[in-house]
């Protein structure tokens, strides 16, 4: 899987995620980010052009060096600084506690091996008044679609870089200690097992840090 995972798959991901429906959602949500931003799963940097002038710096986390090469090229076209961390989402982030104003996660929680551990890292670095913005795909609301998601996911993970079609995204976020303040779900155009989308924002739930 080395050649496929390291060279072919990153290019496929970049092309697929440049579709107009994903771009529309990015244009609605990414401009809401403010201040110091952590983007978990920055991938090929497709969100970068949508950040507003309210952003001071973006810290991009991704384990794929090939995707990061594409992101670095796109980072040259924006006015704010972009710093990259080549690491998995579950590793301890090289950022201080309560240092980030906005966390952005787009189409990434599906492929992180341990999303709960990754979300715990986001919770650690997000300021008390900070915001989590998410655009994800996952488990559908329709039982008939869920059946197919559960059937397809074992194979899909192998060809899609670990992507799970059947994760309950809103539950993962809440269980990690976030309070969802905005949430819209529904299908994008395309095969329903792959296109059920969660879009919204969340804040830290009251309680111990």
Image (cartoon, rainbow, N blue to C red):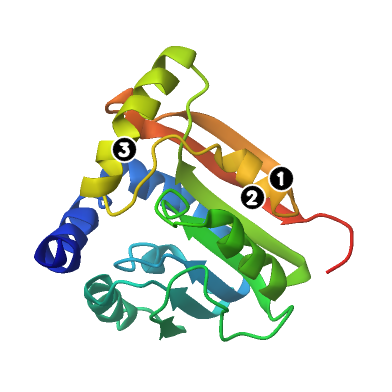
- Asked which secondary structure carries label 2, the reply is strand
Badge 3: residue crowd in 10 Å (few <14, some 14–19, many ≥20): some
Q: Earlier in the sequence, mark 3 or mark 2?
A: 3
Q: CB of mark 3 within 8 Å of CB of mark 1? A: no
Which residue lies at the image location 23% right of the left edge and 73% below the top edge? 70
Residue at the limit of the structure toward the top, as seen here: 144
Q: Earlier in the sequence, mark 3 or mark 1?
A: 3
Which residue position is annotated with label 1?
180
**Quarter assignment of residue 60:** bottom left
In the picture, measured across the screen, residue 136 lies left or right of residue 154, that is right
Residues under labels 3 and 1: Cα distance?
A: 29 Å
**Quarter assignment of residue 103:** bottom right
- Asked which secondary structure carries label 3, the reply is helix
Residues under labels 2 and 1: Cα distance?
A: 6 Å
Q: Earlier in the sequence, mark 2 or mark 1?
A: 1
Q: Quadrant of the N terminus?
A: bottom left
Which residue position is annotated with label 2?
201
- Numbered circles on residues, count: 3
Q: Is residue 85 visible?
A: yes
Query: Residue 172's x, y, as percent?
Result: 62, 46
Residues under labels 3 and 2: Cα distance?
A: 29 Å
Badge 1: residue crowd in 10 Å (few <14, some 14–19, many ≥20): some
Query: Residue 75's x, y, as percent?
Result: 33, 79
Query: Mark 3 or mark 1: which is in front?
Result: 3
Which residue lies at the image location 69% right of the left edge and 66% below the top edge? 123
- Point out which mark residue 154 bears: 3
Q: Is residue 52 visible?
A: no
Q: CB of mark 2 within 8 Å of CB of mark 1? A: yes
Give the answer, above or below, for where 129 lies relative to 92.
above
Badge 2: residue crowd in 10 Å (few <14, some 14–19, many ≥20): many
- Point out which mark residue 170 bears: none
Give the answer, above or below, for where 179 lies relative to 207.
above
């Amino acid at each position: 899987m080395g050649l496929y995972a390291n060279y072919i798959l990153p290019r496929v991901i970049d092309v697929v995620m440049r579709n107009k429906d994903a771009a529309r959602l990015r244009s609605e949500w990414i401009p809401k980010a403010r201040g110091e931003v952590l983007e978990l799963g920055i991938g090929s940097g497709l969100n970068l052009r949508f950040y507003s002038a309210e952003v001071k710096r973006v810290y991009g986390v991704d384990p794929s060096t090939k995707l990061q090469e594409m992101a670095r090229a796109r980072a040259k076209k924006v006015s704010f600084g972009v710093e990259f961390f080549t690491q998995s989402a579950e590793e301890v982030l090289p950022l201080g506690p309560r240092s980030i104003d906005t966390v952005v996660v787009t189409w990434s929680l599906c492929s992180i091996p341990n999303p709960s551990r990754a979300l715990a890292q986001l919770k650690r670095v997000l300021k008390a008044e900070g915001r989590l913005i998410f655009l994800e795909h996952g488990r559908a609301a329709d039982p008939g679609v869920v059946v197919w998601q559960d059937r397809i996911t074992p194979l899909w993970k192998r060809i899609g870089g670990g992507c799970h079609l059947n994760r309950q995204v809103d539950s993962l976020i809440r269980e990690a200690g976030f309070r969802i303040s905005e949430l819209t779900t529904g299908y994008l155009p395309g095969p329903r097992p792959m296109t059920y989308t969660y879009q919204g924002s969340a804040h830290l739930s009251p309680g111990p840090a």
